[in-house]
């Protein structure tokens, strides 16, 4: 794996399979496969960016969204998009 945050992916998949009471063979054994599958199913990928989809949302609503999800961005180490950070 290239991302150190995903070092435990294989073990996490095994735990998830046990929790769901399914054979781990049914789950993707590689994180990149998960992303490829999700991207293939995203029919909106070439139509609008997230920024464009949210451009008509009021600043006050964007600020509420930013405040609600700020902890998630920090917890998971994601960079908040500039258009949301600056709302």
Image (spheres, rainbow, N blue to C red):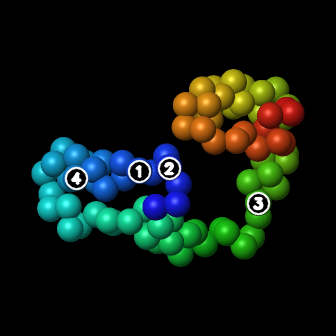
Q: Within the image, what quadrant is residue 62 found in?
A: top right
The residue indicated by pointer 2 is 4
* Residue neighbourhood size for the residue with mark 3, other residues' Cα within 10 Å, grouped as few (<14), some (14–19), many (≥20): few
Q: Are marks 1 and 2 in contact (CB under 8 Å)?
A: yes
The Cα atoms of the two marked residues, 1 and 4, are separated by 13 Å
Q: Do the residues labelled 4 and 2 touch (CB within 8 Å)?
A: no
Q: In this rendered view, identify the residue nearer to me: 27 or 2.
A: 2
The residue indicated by pointer 4 is 14
Q: Earlier in the sequence, mark 2 or mark 3?
A: 2
The Cα atoms of the two marked residues, 4 and 2, are separated by 18 Å
* Quadrant location, the C terminus: top right
The residue indicated by pointer 1 is 7
- In x, y percent, where is residue 58? 84, 34
- Which dot, 4 or 2, sits closer to the camera? 2
Q: Residue at x 30, y 48 (%)?
A: 12
The Cα atoms of the two marked residues, 3 and 1, are separated by 30 Å
* Residue neighbourhood size for the residue with mark 4, other residues' Cα within 10 Å, grouped as few (<14), some (14–19), many (≥20): some
Q: Are marks 1 and 4 in contact (CB under 8 Å)?
A: no
Residue 60 visible in the picture: yes
The residue indicated by pointer 3 is 49
Indicate the secondary structure of the residue bearing disc 3.
loop
* Residue neighbourhood size for the residue with mark 2, other residues' Cα within 10 Å, grouped as few (<14), some (14–19), many (≥20): few
58 with respect to 28 (left or right): right
63 with respect to 69 (left or right): right
The Cα atoms of the two marked residues, 4 and 3, are separated by 34 Å
Q: Earlier in the sequence, mark 4 or mark 2?
A: 2
37 with respect to 49 (left or right): left
- In x, y percent, where is residue 47? 74, 70
Q: Which of marks 4 and 3 is nearer the N terminus?
A: 4
Q: Earlier in the sequence, mark 3 or mark 1?
A: 1
């Amino acid at each position: 794996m290239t991302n150190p945050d995903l070092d435990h992916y294989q073990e996490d998949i095994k735990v998830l399979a046990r929790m769901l009471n399914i054979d781990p063979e049914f789950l993707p054994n590689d994180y990149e496969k998960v992303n490829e599958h999700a991207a293939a199913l995203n029919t909106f990928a070439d139509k609008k960016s997230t920024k464009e989809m949210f451009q008509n949302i009021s600043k006050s609503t964007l600020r509420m969204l930013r405040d609600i999800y700020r902890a998630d961005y920090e917890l998971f180490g994601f960079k908040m998009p500039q258009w949301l950070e600056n709302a």
